[in-house]
Image: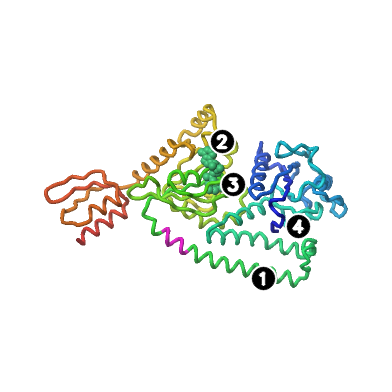
Amino acid sequence: MQLTAKASLTNALLISICTPDFKGDEATESLAELARLVTTLGFKVVGTQSQKQSSTKKVNVLGLGKLAEIAHLTGNQGVGENGDEGEDLAGEDELTLMPSDISSENLAFGCADVVVFDCDLSPSQLRNVENQLGVEVFDRTGIIIEIFSRHARTKTAKLQVEIARLNYVAPRLRETSCGDKERQMGKGAGETTLELNRRKVRDQLAELKRELVSVQHEMKGRRTQRSELFCVALVGYTNAGKSSMMRAITGSDVTGENKLFATLDTTVRALYPTTQPRILVSDTVGFIKKLPHDLVASFHSTLAEAHDASLLLYVVDASDPSFRSQLDVVHEVLEEVGVEDSKKLLVLNKSDQLEPEQLQALMEEFPDAMITSTRNPADVSKMHKYIVDVAQQEMIEEEIIVPYTANGIIGEIRSSMSVTKEEYESCHVKVTVRSNAIDLARLKKRMLNL
Ligand SMILES: Nc1nc2c(ncn2[C@@H]2O[C@H](COP(=O)(O)OP(=O)(O)OP(=O)(O)O)[C@@H](O)[C@H]2O)c(=O)[nH]1
Ligand SMILES: [Mg+2]
């Protein structure tokens, strides 16, 4: 499946299948998140429909009655004639409309150009529903992969996303080979074309994977060079404010946007105001519920920065009512990609959006967390100080005797280590420094050779 509809003109109708797996408000929250994903792609959400079902695995996903109702909104009047029996409605169904200024009366016949399901659909389910509704149908994974494809900037991210996209597309090629869609596109439905397309995808995948291995090799080299520095990684759910925090504490121009998955590439910058030795901060890709498995796998290397970090900052949007379940997702994905959380701090961000009572309740619920707003300079300084303090604790304090004859050594120490004391004696300076073990060992070796 590919997004062929023109994003700027596309009216999307969202469908939620409420299975018993959903607890509490999860279905509503998930649907609201899908609306944001779809909006990120430039679609306009014209309405949402939800229906209780025992599972999302039915041949037509929904019962024929419900499909007919939706077909009215996509302008496909012939619905139901060629549908299989499927299972009928299993419980209540309801029509909700979004945004709030749209009412059921003005959701006109034929107003939806695409239909997006808030679950994963098999290739045959997608085809069946498309046949019934006469418009393009997307599932959640398809939408997420498309956003990733559009937002990937660096070579690594592009390769990773393309691999995930082709893995997603491959089975759809098989299923649509003799379907209506291919005939509509005038491609012909021959087995040979299908075989050819599949082989092309296989070859492309193999080539992309080879390229990725070589790019990852280079990245690993760069990480090794930095390995002696104290590294902080910002991790968390999409839109939590990681890039904004990164920008604030490094004084950099890292993009932060009110879009889901604004960041797909890991960026590394030095903490600012700078410290001796430097402290590095990396911004990473955000997570989302039901993140396609292929994408999780493909982000192993992007998250390698987090893997090597001495301190992980788990940034959450504390103003989002579902931030607790978002945090669970972050823990799950990090566990899946094998990120060891050496030391971590929970950062409850966007505190400017909360009332004093809510802040008080959060402090009681999460006594070890830091409550911040990236828009508040005092909070940014507090975060800066926290990072510097943790980095200092990781360092070793040592006294170094530098003879006055050792040219340049004092300057070198001052530029790469934190000097806590300097005592001038008759033929040498006694310098007390805090630094990491590797830099200290390197300095001592250099002094032996003087
Ligand atoms: N009110 C408020 N908004 C914030 C704060 N921090 C970030 N934002 C806004 O939240 C949105 C998302 O911020 P980003 O920094 O891009 O979020 P992110 O975690 O990097 O998101 P991804 O890159 O998608 O994972 C932007 O519109 C920011 O301006 C904050 O402390 N308060
Ligand atoms: Mg970001």
Q: Residue 303: say if magenta.
A: no
In the displayed structure image, the side of residue 393 where residue 450 appears, left or right: left
Q: Which residues are magenta?
A: 217-223
Q: Secondary structure at mark 2?
A: loop
Q: Which residue is mark 2?
A: 319
| Residue drawn at (68%, 63%) of the image | 170
Question: Does the Cβ of the disc 3 residue fall within 8 Å of ligand 1?
Answer: yes
Q: Which residue is mark 3?
A: 259
CA neighbours of label 3 inside 10 A, class few (<14), some (14 to 19), many (20+):
some
Q: How many marks?
A: 4
Q: In the rendering, at what x and y percent does residue 203 appear?
A: 62, 70
Q: Which residue is mark 1?
A: 199
Q: Is residue 349 visible?
A: no
Q: Which residue is mark 4?
A: 124
Main secondary structure of the magenta stretch = helix
Q: Earlier in the sequence, mark 2 or mark 1?
A: 1
